[in-house]
Image (cartoon, rainbow, N blue to C red):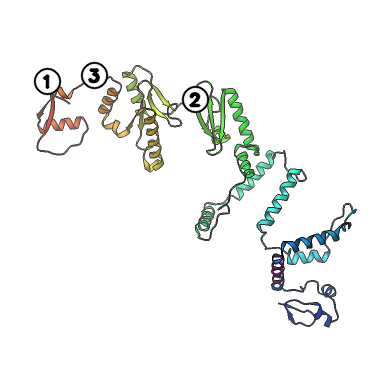
Amino acid sequence: MITCKICGRLFKAINKRHLAQHGITRHGYMLKFPYSPLQSPESAENRRLASIKRQADLSPEVKLVRSTKISESRKGKSSWNAGKAGYKLEWSEEAKTRRKEYGAWNSGIPASDEQKFKQSKTMKQKYNSGELQHWNLGGTVPVEVREKISKKCKEYKPTQEQKEKHLKSIRLRVSSPDYKSPMKGKKHTNETKQKISSNQIGENNHGRKKLREKIENICKAENLEYIFDSKTSHFNFTCKKCNFNFSFTRGYFSPSAIKLNHAVQNNICPSCYPRIKIKSKKEIAIFDFIKENYSNEIVSGTRCQIYPYEIDIFLPELKIGVEFNGLYWHSENVLGVEHARKEFNKYNLCKNKNILLINIFEDEWNQKQNIIKSKILHLINKTARKIHARKCELKIIGSETKNIFFKENSLFYDDVELNIGAFLKMNFCQ
């Protein structure tokens, strides 16, 4: 409800009839009381809805007749600002003060989807036609400005508590039953798909353009070819020298990785230039033991067989791989369950390529070194002494010989009434 400033009565809307009783027109009332409305917000909303309903109820034929009448009436008439070059519509002082106090007429009212679509369409047309241009088109931000921005960003860097609060609020919002994803039931258009792919590849990004130029220079120098996979965000390389396929992420070529010596920018093919790996003493001891007893080719730390996974020791002719697993760095407490899945994937890849993968754990090497060495010798066909079961005889043995046998072979046992052992030519097989 609104009040009449002359008589103080309440109305939904002050009409001409009431103003005529005071001897004043609508225009005169607005000039006398510039900040007092002639209609309440409720009545304005009701009138708006009623007009929308009336328009919806009209048949298409009536709408067409009305539009043709309006267009015919406007034919031959020039617009109010025709021929007035450089004319600009300016706000009056009263209108400016009123806008400052009350704000725009549509403040707080969210735009509809149709309005947003129309606005985005017009802006796209303007940018495509060249009528509008980005203020920094073709330019780069200077180093001084970047440093200033980085300093300011560091000042406003959120704390850990603020980050946790923000994450909690997002989780609560998403977990609520009223939450609806803005893309639910919708699909990307072909234009947006092209934009996403171009952004991922780096066509519209200055930093990624530099990265692509850098990788192209490396490929020319090292005789390589590459394809960018947008789904996995990996650069897939193929070496023309050895026909070996390998891949790296963007992070491998980042400046931070180069500073920390985490990435090698030259000789990146792992087949042509194997990486130098820091190995444990026990892994070196196993490698030296195999080298003493095996004369053919032995490869240490290869990734060529089951890329990107690595085999610690590989015998190409026999297709045997040896993995040494330290207890600390191969435990679930340190690396989690994902490491166990990684090891299982490595085993399956070796199985598919008919490679026998042997896993030696640190405690096994410490406690059962003789047994592991004998197993390795048997696999490389260097067993010094072979005992065939058919040539042996079974006899009852005493508890002392049984205890000695189990201790020497680091085996566990239970007390039983009868102990049986294998004998070859009257000698107990140990």
Q: Few, some or many C-alpha atoms within 10 Å of disc 2 (few <14, some 14-19, many ≥20)?
A: some
Q: Mark 2: which secondary structure?
A: loop
Real-space CA distance between mark 2 and mark 3, rounded to the nearest whole angstrom: 39 Å
53 is within the stretch colored magenta: yes
Residue 28 placement (x, y as % from top left): 85, 74
| Nearer to us: label 1 or label 2 | 2
* Amino acid type of the residue tagged 3 in the rendering: Ala
- CB-based contact (under 8 Å), mark 1 and mark 2: no
In the image, taking residue 191 as reference, residue 324 lies left or right, namely: left
Residue 165 placement (x, y as % from top left): 52, 56
229 is within the stretch colored magenta: no
* Quarter where residue 355 is shown: top left
Which stretch did the figure color magenta? 46-55
Seen at 70% across and 53% down, the residue is 118
Q: Earlier in the sequence, mark 1 or mark 2?
A: 2
Give the labeled residue for mark 1. 425
Q: Quadrant of the C terminus?
A: top left
> Does 402 sit above or below residue 183?
above
In the rendered image, is residue 336 in sight? no
Seen at 52% across and 51% down, the residue is 160
User: Any mark on residue 384, and which?
Assistant: 3
- CB-based contact (under 8 Å), mark 2 and mark 3: no
* Amino acid type of the residue tagged 1 in the rendering: Lys
Q: Earlier in the sequence, mark 3 or mark 1?
A: 3
Real-space CA distance between mark 1 and mark 2, rounded to the nearest whole angstrom: 55 Å
Q: Quadrant of the N terminus?
A: bottom right
In the rendered image, is residue 160 in sight? yes
Real-space CA distance between mark 3 and mark 1, rounded to the nearest whole angstrom: 18 Å
User: Any mark on residue 244, and which?
Assistant: 2
- CB-based contact (under 8 Å), mark 3 and mark 1: no
Q: Few, some or many C-alpha atoms within 10 Å of disc 1 (few <14, some 14-19, many ≥20)?
A: few
